[in-house]
Image (cartoon, rainbow, N blue to C red):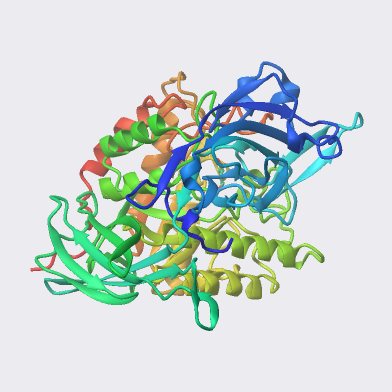
């Protein structure tokens, strides 16, 4: 997606207006795929309404609606004030999963592929000013081997389509994040990049502002573009005091007496960007950011030059009734629970989350591994089972006909994710895949392209990584060489040697880590998944698998091993809360590896984790500096 002023986080300022279009929209499934031919772009002819934003699946009481795969349509009406004439008018979608086509007053405005990042439709020409406008969105949630996330779509004998995800979460879809109507100036700020630098007790903020000149003037030689506008920056501290000012599209601001952004001790500066021409304010927008650096040095992860040990979770955006829909209430509750456990970090498994999640992480001082929606690059509808047992390896990147298109979609998602999230102090790393099948040589150019794209797009040059499954050990994986630190998803005590074999599981985990130690890669390792499915109501003494006692024992066993190795620099349990998956005999109405239930109440292991993490210093495993 080309960067436009409309992709910046939507906020009203003196020069911009952002109006919410969230609410009840008309909704209609299109099982015959007849909506296009029947002209639903001019009105979908539905009586049914449902809330936007939300996933559509869990509102209905019949299976066919919940499992629906294919095209479905939304419709709403909005009013454009007459005084917006002359402005650039957009509709911005936080996400439409997995792809959408936007029609305004019957005209197709834009199409977008990829369900977890924002896009905008320019409706300046199509809008009726001073009147009602019809917005219709055609959404499609089919999976394929070229889309992100990866899966396939099958057709049952009666013609019904069915999604077969290659990943372990329900294929929730729809207009899942907020929708905003925007009025923007024609000469605008389209982007800002911020790079904090810290030396001793001094801090600088390097910046680059991108703008477009959107107006023309009549001159003696004809109509020419208006002269460049002048960018001015003002940095405010949390008390609203001006601490630095700058002029020009690029520059370096020095911040006096800087308060650094630290883990669980955040401090945010507000960077206002204003565009002027001849003293007239044309556009203004702000970004909240923090002063911090991130670096990998040897086997350490350094924040502001100090070692940090990651404690936290792999998560999902997932809740009762709204599915993967944006829920500020759940965002708030999740952060409160994470703080209560003593966590300091999480991974946005397995896709970029709503923008508001990162804003809260910025505010709360959480460290985020931001993950691209590249999950399921492994040919199996139960990859988490097969892969975690080291079975069924299908060289994914060797497949003729799919890799090139997959790569194109993957690169787009990586670029869009980094452009959206690059200024968040909370984002300390990019995770570019979850558990790809990367043991064949064809993985090498694919990985190189993805890792290079991430480096090129990120002004802060953050560390890059991906989450590895059992068979992606540094000696078998072709991808690990690209990672700045190595993330391990490992299920010793669950998929590998569970129950009464826990002692053998512990030995097997130690053997694997001894093998890693012997390779002496000089990089940090982080466990980004480990855990056990646990029924929130089941207790047994002595434990058996699925009980709350057993979940704690699996965590204890893993921690006993992690604690022995200094190059293990983090532990993120799978998962924060129970979440919905497709149905099947290996899932009890969803994945139950949550430390919290889906309703965000603690299982017994939550109290154990709290006790451990509250007693682990943020710089755990760092020799004390005297
Ligand atoms: C994994 C996947 C995650 C699954 C998990 C599990 O390796 O990354 O998406 O949910 O295993 O519980 O099987």
Total label count? 0
Residue at the farthest front position: 220
Q: Position of residue 555 (x, y in %)?
A: 39, 41
Quadrant observed for ligand 1 in the rendered image: top right
Q: Give whichever of 600, 606 is nearer the camera.
A: 600
The structure residue drawn at horizontal position 73% and vertical position 57%, both measured from the top left corner, is 146
Q: Residue 4, how many percent across, how many down?
A: 51, 61
Q: Along the horizontal axis of the image, is 245 left or right of 144? A: left
Quarter assignment of residue 460:
bottom left
Looking at the image, the residue that sits furthest to the bottom is 221
> Residue drawn 33% across and 74% down?
298
Quadrant assignment for the C terminus: bottom left
Left or right position of 117 against 612: right
Give whichever of 556, 3 is nearer the camera. Answer: 3
**On-image quarter of the N terminus:** bottom right
- Asked if residue 514 is positioned above or below residue 540 in the image, the reply reads below
- Quadrant position of residue 437: bottom right
Residue 223 position, x and y percent, is 55, 75
Q: Taking the image as drawn, is residue 124 in sight?
A: yes
* Furthest residue toward top: 61
Image side of residue 194 versus residue 590, left or right: left
- Percent across and percent down for residue 285 are 34, 56
**Residue 558 is at least partly visible in this image:** no
């Amino acid at each position: 997606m080309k960067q436009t002023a409309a992709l910046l986080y939507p906020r009203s300022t003196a020069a911009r207006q952002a109006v919410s279009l969230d609410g009840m929209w008309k909704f209609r499934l299109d099982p015959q795929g007849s909506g296009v031919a029947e002209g639903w772009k001019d009105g979908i002819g539905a009586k049914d309404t449902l809330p936007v934003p939300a996933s559509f699946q869990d509102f209905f009481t019949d299976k066919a609606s919940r499992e629906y795969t294919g095209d479905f349509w939304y419709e709403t009406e909005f009013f454009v004030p007459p005084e917006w004439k002359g402005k650039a008018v957009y509709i911005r979608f936080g996400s439409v999963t997995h792809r959408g086509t936007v029609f305004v007053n019957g005209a197709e405005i834009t199409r977008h592929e990829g369900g977890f990042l924002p896009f905008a439709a320019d409706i300046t020409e199509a809008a009726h000013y001073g009147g009602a406008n019809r917005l219709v969105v055609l959404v499609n949630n089919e999976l394929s081997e070229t889309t992100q996330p990866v899966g396939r779509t099958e057709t049952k004998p009666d013609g019904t389509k069915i999604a077969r995800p290659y990943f372990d979460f329900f294929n929730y879809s729809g207009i899942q994040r907020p929708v905003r109507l925007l009025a923007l100036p024609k000469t605008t700020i389209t982007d800002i990049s911020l790079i904090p630098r810290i030396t001793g007790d001094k801090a600088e903020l390097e910046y680059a502002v991108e703008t477009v000149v959107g107006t023309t003037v009549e001159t003696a030689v004809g109509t020419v573009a208006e002269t460049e506008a002048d960018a001015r920056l003002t940095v405010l501290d949390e008390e609203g005091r001006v601490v630095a000012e700058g002029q020009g599209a690029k520059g370096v601001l020095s911040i006096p007496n800087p308060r650094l952004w630290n883990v669980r001790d955040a401090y945010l500066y507000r960077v206002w960007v204003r565009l002027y021409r001849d003293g007239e304010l044309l556009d203004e927008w702000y970004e909240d950011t923090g002063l911090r650096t991130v670096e990998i040095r040897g086997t350490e992860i350094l924040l502001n030059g100090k070692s940090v040990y990651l404690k936290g979770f792999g998560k999902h955006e997932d809740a009762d009734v709204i599915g993967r829909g944006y829920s500020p209430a759940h965002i708030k509750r999740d952060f409160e629970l994470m703080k209560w456990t003593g966590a300091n970090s999480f991974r946005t498994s397995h896709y970029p989350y709503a923008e508001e999640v990162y804003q809260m992480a910025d505010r709360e001082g959480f460290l985020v591994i931001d993950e691209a929606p590249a999950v399921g690059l492994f040919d199996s509808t139960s990859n988490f089972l097969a892969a975690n047992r080291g079975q069924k390896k299908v060289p994914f990147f060797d497949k003729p006909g799919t890799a090139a298109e997959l790569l194109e979609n993957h690169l787009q998602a990586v670029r869009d994710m980094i452009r959206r999230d690059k200024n968040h102090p909370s984002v300390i790393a990019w995770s570019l895949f979850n558990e790809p099948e990367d043991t064949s040589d064809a993985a090498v150019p694919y990985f190189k392209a993805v890792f290079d794209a991430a480096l090129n797009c990120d002004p802060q040059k953050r560390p890059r990584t991906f989450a590895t499954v059992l068979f992606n050990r540094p000696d078998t994986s072709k991808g690990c060489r690209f990672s700045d630190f190595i993330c391990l998803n490992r299920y010793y005590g669950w998929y590998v040697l569970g129950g009464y074999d826990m002692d053998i599981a512990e030995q097997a985990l130690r053997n694997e880590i001894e093998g890693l130690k012997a390779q002496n890669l000089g990089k940090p390792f982080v466990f980004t998944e480990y855990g056990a499915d646990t029924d929130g109501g089941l207790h047994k003494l002595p434990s058996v698998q699925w009980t709350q006692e057993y979940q704690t024992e699996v965590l204890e066993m893993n921690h006993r091993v992690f604690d022995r190795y200094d190059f293990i620099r983090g532990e993120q349990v799978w998962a924060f809360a129970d979440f919905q998956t497709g149905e099947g005999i290996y899932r009890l109405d969803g994945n139950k590896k949550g430390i919290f239930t889906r309703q965000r109440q603690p299982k017994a292991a939550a109290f154990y984790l709290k006790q451990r993490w509250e007693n682990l210093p943020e710089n755990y495993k760092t020799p004390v500096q005297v």
